[in-house]
Image (cartoon, coloured by chain):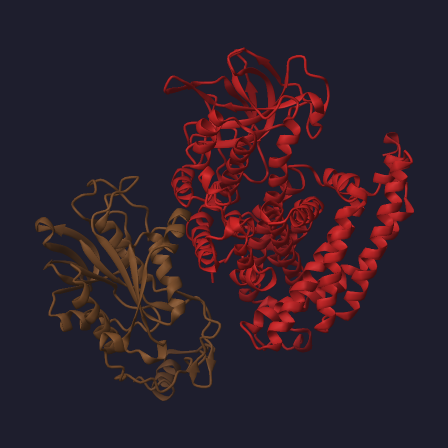
Chain colours: A brown, B red
Amino acid sequence: MKILVTAKRIPDPGQKIKLKGNALDLSAANWQLNQFDEYAVEAALRLTEDGAAPATRQGAVTVASLGPADVQQQLRSALAMGADKAIRVEAKDEELDAVIVAKTLEKLVRRDQPDLVLMGKLAADNEGNDVGQRLAALLGWPQATFACSIQVVDGGKALLVGREVDNGVEIKKVRLPAVVTVDLRIIAPQAVKNGRTAANFAYPEGPRYASLKGIRAAKDKPIEALTLSGLGVSTALQVKTHGSELPPARQAGKKIASVHELVEKLRSEAKVL
Amino acid sequence: MVNPLISDRDVDFLLYEVFDAPALCSLPAFADHGRPTFDLVLQNSRRFAREVLFPTYKAMDAEPPRLENGRIVLHPLWHKIYPQLVALDVIAASRPYAAGGQQLPLLVTTLASTYLMAGNLNAAGLVGLTAGAAHLIEEFGSDALKQDFMARMYRGEWTGTMALTEPQAGSSLADLKTRATPTGEGHYRIKGSKIFISAGDHNLTDNIVHMTLARIDGAPAGIKGISLFAVPTRRWQGSTLVDNDVAVAGMIHKIGWRGGPSLALEFGERDDCHGWLVGEPGRGLSCMFQMMNEARIMVGANGVSTASVAYHQAVLYARERLQGRPPSVKADASRPPVPIIEHADVRRMLLRQKAIVDGGLALLAVTALQRDLAGHSTTQHERHRAGLLLDLLTPITKTFPAERGFEANALSLQVHGGYGYSSEFLPEAWLRDQKLNSIHEGTTGIQGLDLLGRKAVADGGAALSILTEEIEQAVQKASAAGVFPAACTRLREAMARIAELTMQLAQKGLAGDVEGMLLHSADYLELLSIVVVSWLWLQQATVATQQLGQDQGDADSYQGKLCAAQYWLATELPRVSHLIDLCRSGEDSYARMQPAWF
């Protein structure tokens, strides 16, 4: 199975946000791979291997990202986990929106013809949650979002995808090729079943840590460099950022003497009644 | 906020701004690597330590191993983390490709290992021991031993120990009695008792290889009669492993490092314990020194890591714990209480910890760098120079993080107040862990004797001259950047006086008064430790000043470096003069003190 996985770099969500004027100041940001994309890499690796040691692989995993040269570090990190090759499309973070990203991915998919596009359900920086859906529409492919389990069925022609929805887990069958976006539980020990890995095999919880051998091997794996213009993608932004500000600091709480006073304050101060 | 264990910013600062780790890649041994690889190695250690190791620490401290039917049963969490630790390939990270390693610089792997140690020192300790034991076989063992033992150890299939200490001969290896009788079949029969053997038994792997010191029958008494053997817990009989007569005689009930076993082992109770000679007969101790020196640096790394994790815990606590008001508004009870980090004395305790932790981390880095240069520089001169500096730094890198780390760990507990004095909070556990570091792999007393009696006076004080050159360079750079001029002067003067003091003490020794020469070796060790760490603080302050001047990177972290440097140089550097006077004076109170007078 040929799988294309998307990998966005984001600033470490644990870091304090800094502003310069009314724009985000990312000069001292610690960049890392979006965690949901990392889960997608892990899911792709589980779909293409047999779980044994040493594992045998069937298929290929390509990781793609849009961004400046530094993004190579996040791509190498995915290659060190075990992905086979990477694609980087040169772009500046501030010159991208979801439409440009989705159209770029469409071009890559039409060119490389993967059987499956695996993506994080969203990027944990702006929590957009729309690139996967846009891509499926552009391609005219079936989509399954928020996947918490994936099972290969019909001799590799379709997937049974468990989707996390508000009232539980919905199981959908999608024929391939398809776009699947993954949620947190896709990295549970037995969430991915490719039909080859022993039924009782359990992975350690979470995305794998690269071995030092994997890290060394990653150095020699190819990272293809492309440009938006080379791919024929329009760079006109449809979403523009007008400014960023921190949420207002929380006010200290107040102790209230009576229910009467509470109702009064809800009406006059909070204005919710 | 969660405990970062070790600050990523501080590690990156040392690797990329102070010591230029990527420059090592111009050496043929490291030509394959570069910063992208280093960053991935670090990223892996960081995440693994935080996500997998640290969450297991408290449970393993609370439930130490059990001795059942003569065998050690470990906490079940060991079985979860050990295979994952092995899968990272960290055991042979710095060994050559030919030995199954990844040929990474020790500068990088040593700093990466601090995360693992800070996360769970018992797990990291087992890896370190196994690596050190396998390295002995790699360096001195036969090809057969390399294939049978070393390769499996580097792959983590078997683990290793160092079996030196005996009940009647603790630090005094000259008195050890374990015997090795030649069998004429290529191996020896080993018989004797060993004690304090870390990871001497467990149920994680099929086998454990004990690097054991013993005397071949007929060998002379003392150091020259000692040889090194690889003695497995189980040995091959055809293609199956059978019991090799290494029995667990007892388990030590330790106050720290409680997740892993420390054991008394009995070799050859049934006269059926086979051992294989490693290196030449009679050269056991000199071979073993390779592992001991590595282990001493590992102890230093552990000291820094254990102090660091506690320091970060104290910072987190002090930022969140609300209590009291600043002195200026003390009387005003209507003002809300402030986080205790607002109180000057709490910040003093935190900054003292930071000065020790960051200073220790820099010490570790500069020592690891000398190991890389001593092993892989392209010229004989550079290798020799780095080797001398490494020899001089080793007792300091072993001791400073252990002794000052203990002080830092006590301060972390103190910041937690009454809660710190309870086992509900972690600082007391780290304090217990830290205490071992001034004891194992040569006590602080022994390190002082090693530094003054051997390292400082070897080759007519050659190592001390190199240190003086290094300090002079740092002082010149600092002066050019206008950094702490008073400290620059003081440091320069201190080195001149230390050279003079060392010569004076060496002459005393040459004249036959060895006891007089070594009387203040512990003070001498402390003196040199303060000077070396001051040198490293001066270097860090210089870089921080330059980066701030160019508006580079994270200003908060550079300001923090400058305050810690200022604190260290203001509070510790003045002690140098006093310690020099003390060493010179030959102050003889404890020399004259008689056992009956205590």
Q: State which quarter of the image contains the C terminus of chain A.
A: bottom left
The answer to whether residue B342 is visible is no
Residue B29 screen position, x and y as percent = 52, 48
Q: Nearer the viewer, residue B264 or A69?
A: A69
In the picture provided, is B574 more to the left or to the right than A37? right
Residue lying at the far left in this picture: please name it. A154
Say whether residue B523 is left or right of residue B14. right
Quadrant housing residue A110: bottom left
Q: Which residue, as the protein is rendered here, is positioned at the far bottom?
A: A268
Q: Residue at x 86, y 42 (%)?
A: B506
Task: Name the residue nearer the viewer: B420 or A177.
Answer: A177
B97 in relation to A217, above or below? above
* Residue ID at (45%, 21%): B234
The residue located at (71%, 17%) in the rendering is: B220
Q: Indicate the position of residue B393 as horizontal and vertical percent values.
A: 69, 48
Q: Is residue B585 left or right of residue B181?
A: right
Residue B120 appears in the figure: yes
Q: How many marks?
A: 0
Height in image: B61 above or below B541? above
The residue sitting at the front extreme is B379
Question: Residue B535 at x, y = what percent?
Answer: 71, 59
Q: Quadrant of residue B434?
A: top right
Percent across and percent down for residue B138 are 52, 33
